Each structure stands twice: as structure tokens, then as C-alpha cells.
Image (cartoon, rainbow, N blue to C red):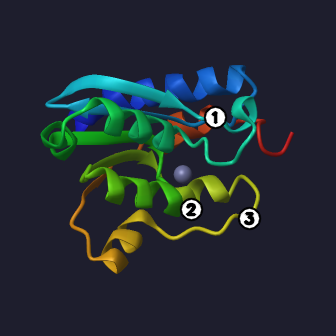
Amino acid sequence: MERHAPYLRRCIELSLRAREKGNMPFGSLLAVDGRIVLEGENTNSSEGHPFGHSEMNVLREACQRLSPGELQRAALYTAVEPCLMCCGAMLHSGVRHLVFGCTTKALLERTQPYPFIESQRVFELLGVSVTLEWLDMEAEVLKAHEGFWNS
Ligand SMILES: [Zn+2]
């Protein structure tokens, strides 16, 4: 599991970069065979619509640039557990490996109420086999959110 930590730390950096641009502090990346091929950050505010989740941005570009084989071998790393929409995007993209550093539940305890279903439950309901790994980096991830939601 520790091998995932550098990728998740990069996601946290991307979260902070998003925040600096006035967006929500979320960042993601895609690695194929351990090599980072794409990075993304939240663009909700800068692009003016609510679909700009970092996972969506990464997966959209991945589908345009990577082969089906690469997508199949890819791992989506994201600082915070993805929402329902982004789990759906994973389903459609063919990416079947997800790693995150903080649960949505932990984040929501510090933010505003938001409807969510745990990623694992989403994939179970969909009957999709996804390798899901959660590396507990909650404290580091939530640091990027300090003062953002309830300031
Ligand atoms: Zn999302």
C-alpha cells in the first residue's frame, strides 16, 4: 500500500493547485504501469459548471489519449474518494483500479451535506469489478481543505 503514497501526495499537490485557482481542492491522476500519464484538478469554478471534478477531467482526457489496453491497466489515484458521477465515468472509461487517500465520509464531516454513496457500494450495485484501495492519508488530504468549506 505504501507504494501508493507518492501518487496520493501528488494528488494533494494538485488539490492545492486547484484551490489556488479558486476551485474546490480536489486533485487526481492516472498512472499506467506505475507511470503517471495524466494529472487533473477540479475546474468547477474556472470552467463554470459542476462536472469539473478532477476525476472527470482526468478520465475524459484519458479516453481521448490512451488505448483501451492502457485504460485497462491504468490506476486512477484521487485524494478523496470519488462521487457517484466519477464512479460512473470510471465505469465508462474502462479504468478498473481506484486508489484514494480519504473517504468522502471523512470529508463530509467537515463540509456541507452532500448526497453520496461509498465507491465500493456503487461498484457493487453496478456489478463492476474494480480493484479499490484506500490508503489512510486522511490528515494530509484534509489539510488541503482547511478553511475552504466553512470559512
Ligand atoms: Zn466526482
Q: Amino acid at mark 2?
A: Lys
Q: Which residue has dot 3 on it?
A: 113
Q: Can residue 140 be seen from the camera position used here?
A: yes
Rendering quarter of residue 58: top left
What residue is drawn where x is 17% and y is 37%? 70
Dot 2: element: helix
Lower sequence index among marks 2 and 3: 2
Label total for image: 3
Q: Which residue has dot 2 on it?
A: 105
Q: Which residue has dot 1 on it?
A: 25
How much space separates mark 1 and mark 2, taking CA atoms? 16 Å
Image coordinates for residue 138, horizontal then vertical, percent: 50, 44
Q: Are marks 2 and 3 in contact (CB under 8 Å)?
A: no
Q: Amino acid at mark 3?
A: Pro
Name the one closer to the observer, 111 or 116.
Answer: 116
- Marking on residue 93: none
- Quick check: 49 above or below 15? below
- Which quadrant is the C terminus positioned in? top right
User: Left or right of 94: which side holds 72?
Assistant: left
Q: Amino acid at mark 1?
A: Pro
What residue is drawn where x is 36% and y is 67%? 120
- Which quadrant is the N terminus positioned in? top left
Lower sequence index among marks 3 and 1: 1
Q: How busy is the neighbourhood of tag 2: few (under 14 within 10 Å), some, or many (20 plus)?
A: some
Image coordinates for residue 118, horizontal then vertical, percent: 46, 67
Dot 1: element: loop
Q: Are marks 1 and 2 in contact (CB under 8 Å)?
A: no
- Quick check: 26 above or below 100? above
Name the one closer to the observer, 75 or 65.
Answer: 65
How much space separates mark 3 and mark 1, taking CA atoms? 17 Å
User: Left or right of 1: which side holds 93?
Assistant: right
